[in-house]
Image: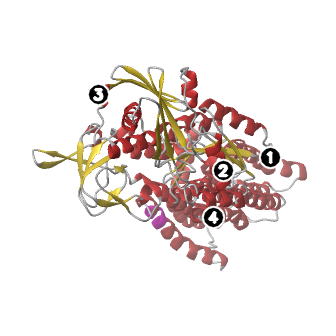
Amino acid sequence: MTKKQKNMLYRIIIAAVIYIPLFVMEHMGKLEFETTFPISFLLFMVPYVIVGWDIVYRAVRNISHGQVFDENFLMCIATFGALGVQEYSEAVAVMLFYQIGELFQGYAVGKSRQSISEMMDICPEYANIEVDGQLKQVDPDDVSVGDIIVVKAGERIPLDGVVVSGTSFVDTSALTGESVPRKVGEGSEIISGCVNGSGLLKVKTTKEFDDSTVAKILELVENASSKKAKVENFITKFAKYYTPFVVCAAVVLAIFPPLVLSQPFGEWLKRACIFLVISCPCALVISVPLGFFGGIGAASRQGVLVKGSNYLEVLSEMKTIVFDKTGTLTKGEFAVSKILPGEECKEEELLEMAALAEGFSDHPVAGALKNAYVERVSSALSMERVADAREIPGHGIMARIDGNLVCAGNAKLMEKEGVWYEANPEPGTVVYLAKDGIYMGSIVISDTVKPEARQAISQLRRSGVAKTVMLTGDRREVGEAVAHELGIDQVYTDLLPGDKVDKVESLLSELGEKERLGFVGDGINDAPVLGRADIGIAMGSMGSDAAIEAADIVLMDDDIMKISAVMRIARQTLKIVKQNIVFALLVKAAVLLLGALGMANMWEAVFADVGVSVIAILNSMRTLKVK
């Protein structure tokens, strides 16, 4: 509990301690005095003021700012009306139970925020830099790319980088939900926000703090609550018009029946007050966003970042899911499996040209080529020999090496540059090379399917996904082999990034009105498709910054098994939210009708307001426990 909530709890307890004896005495007839001095009124005003002064203050303040119709206004009008018809006990009870409901609501919201705020704890406060043999703590913002930082045991890693010395086990659970620490050593990539376990690590930073993993995650979390679901937006608009409407209805109820039926104003004023208490929209305006917030929190505990409640809504309706292949369904851990040099070219030269051309790229294929060069030819690449390197999406890379124009990519790049080449039928990813327009040979790189991919596809089917599709820029033989192994329904191969967008648009046109399409990818070339799909899901660990930026949902540990888990969370969240809406509207409508007919008293009105709110909030909190 916060300090403010504790103060409220004390006020409620003090007011209740004073109110309960007064309530008992009133029902025993001990508060009937033979004087015109309003002793009973003053006695009941003590707990009323203690527990409700801030409601009256907020109502007055909001009215002065032009915000008339809110729950504070409703509570004030209702309790003032009850005091006006000498229902002092009921007036105090309404204010007391309303504050109990508010306290409970604040506690529930705090609880649901906690699961997300735990992610906010990943923000590092400082970085250690070695200066003259001494460690100096500096702001992570002041560390430049290429600086060496020292991370001691138990400290949070402040910036992304590569370990240059030391070994340790790193706790990545705050980012990925993975409870088993990951072993890192010299050459291991390391991301900010994780906690160093036991050893001392020296890390060469690869990104500035603003571009680091932790900064991007914090930005995404902070923006998550601004993207509301349709249901949430509907409730916000509903409350905007609903509250003035019920106030007008209460005024009509208080004035017209006495005039038309010639009945006492006091009775109908009392009914109007009961009507106002019942009609307070707290149960809807609090429980609905709380439900979505709980769903986002439950997903974050699984290591899945959902950028807004609207995406939970879309995910619950997903019927078609489309996968990128490399890095998504396959490990993306490529290795050179075959080198086929052309005439007048040696294996070492072919591998060297390929490694140099891909030297500035972070693509897994580039990594495989560089690793093979280091293992088979030389321990270091002379990247100063490379100039004007540029990536051609869906084709490959072109660069000047020692002044010669080298093309490294797929068959489309060779055809685009008008280079004669010898088609390589080997399964796997084939990189063709040409120097100054002359074919040098080809290198085959193989990837392996993720062990959990087949089970993930099966789980998605059980979760209600009707169609699975794979899009890849790889050759037909490779794509179809992977799709067959995983049991994917459709596969499209030899695609450029633009072709993937076209395929997704075609698949979107086949969907029904309430069916949605999701796309799962990781590379920079997936960013357009992630943005075009109804919902984009990116790999947070090995995905590119562009893909993570364009996606709606980020899998922090790249575990595609968690997609079906988040679908369950999304559907359960929507189910709970709809339960709350139906329950609150039905109870309120029934008690409103009874109140208007004089068949409901103030206690039943309190239940219809505070009781329904508490039940709806409790129901919303179930979303936090969905797995």
Callout 2 secondary element: helix
4 or 3: tag closer to the N-terminus = 3
Magenta segment: does it hold 471? no
Residue 221 makes an appearance in the image: yes
The disc placed on residue 252 is 1
Single out the mark in the foreground, 4 or 3.
Answer: 3
Q: Which residues are magenta?
A: 6-11
Q: Residue furthest right?
A: 261
Coordinates of residue 23 in the picture (x, y in percent): 61, 74
The disc placed on residue 384 is 3
Coordinates of residue 99 in the picture (x, y in percent): 56, 61
Quadrant in which the N terminus appears: bottom left
4 or 1: tag closer to the N-terminus = 1
The residue that label 4 is drawn on is: 614
Disc 1/disc 2 C-alpha distance (Å) = 67 Å
The disc placed on residue 483 is 2
1 or 3: tag closer to the N-terminus = 1
Task: Say how many tags the image has.
Answer: 4
Vertical relation: 64 (above or below) 337? above
Coordinates of residue 371 in the picture (x, y in percent): 37, 44
Q: Give the residue type that dot 2 points to.
A: Ala
